[in-house]
Image: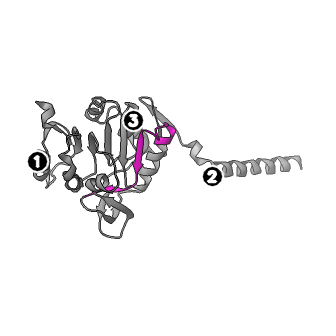
Amino acid sequence: MTHLIIRIFRYALKIIDKSAFARNWQSFVPEITTAGIAFWCPNSHCSYRARTLLTKEPDTIAWIDSMQVNEILWDIGANIGCYSLYAARRGCQVIAFEPHAGNYDVLTRNIIINGYEQMIRAYCLAVSDFPGLLTLRTSAISPGTADHRLTLCQDGQAVIAYTAAEMVGELKMPIPNHIKIDVDGAEFRVLSGLEPILLDERIKSVMIEIQHGNSNYGAMLDIFDKSGMKLKDINRMNHLFVRESREK
């Protein structure tokens, strides 16, 4: 009889433990700290991004290191926020844009666990060449993933899109000093919507990832040239453009 009671008691404890895990599963998700920044890592994609913060794109890190305290960075295609968080730690004010729901979830958690709510404003919207209700065709729903595509079809995650110029003119977002663009093939659409404000001399530099073989490569170079920005450096797919007057 005693053995039966013990077995029932142990079984009850297992049920209680599973219930507690179901209620508090977030507390079991590991955090990884890199460069003094805590990252909430619910899967291997996020863990990889956290662990390679300083090594995956050293050119991006060096570019952010060159920014001044309180300068404004727009991070278009922020994913889980690695470079937004690094820039905030360096003292920059950051506006981050990430339309993918899973990435945005982890992005906002990372902002909160680091106490950067006053340094980073994150928006779950797409930056494009025209405003409207669009669809994000995702490569995966898991956070930390990339290669998602904006489309007009209905098969995917519904998103709201704005042009950069409209966000400044209608939503009163501040003009950035620096812009990072990493949008997996939608670079020309982002730049087309950004073009009306690129002439503003408060914009000092743009780091944009342009995929190899992009058919709009020449047109994008023309946009920067007309805006008074020149190509300073290319590192893999990252292209760094700077205000021409600042290089003289």
Q: Please indicate, yes or no, whether residue 210 appears anywhere in the rendered image.
A: no
The residue positioned 57% from the left and 46% from the top of the image is 26
Q: Is residue 137 magenta?
A: no
Q: CA distance from mark 2 to mark 1?
A: 56 Å
Q: Is residue 133 visible to the viewer in this orientation of the structure?
A: yes
Residue 69, by quadrant, is top left
- Range of residues picked out in magenta: 110-128
Q: CA distance from mark 3 to mark 1?
A: 31 Å
Q: Is residue 60 left or right of residue 221?
A: right
Figure disc tally: 3
In the drawing, does residue 104 fall left or right of residue 184? right
Q: Secondary structure at mark 1?
A: helix
Amino acid residing under circle 1: Lys
In which quadrant of the rendered view does residue 85 lie? top left
Query: Residue under circle 1?
Result: 226
**Crowdedness near tag 2: few (<14), some (14–19) or many (≥20) residues, C-alpha within 10 Å:** few
Whether residue 158 is situated above or below residue 236 in the rendered picture:
below
Q: Within 10 Å of the Cα at label 3, are there few (<14), some (14-19), or many (20+) other Cα atoms?
A: many
| Left-right relation of 116 to 5 | left
Sequence-wise first label, 3 or 1: 3
The C terminus, quarter of image? top left
**Which residue is at 28% across, 51% downward?**
183
How far from the left and from the top, in percent, is residue 108? 46, 46
Q: Amino acid at mark 2?
A: Ala
> Can you identify the residue that label 2 sits on?
22
In front: label 2 or label 1 = 1
Q: Nearer the viewer, residue 21 or 198?
A: 198
Residue picked out by circle 3? 88
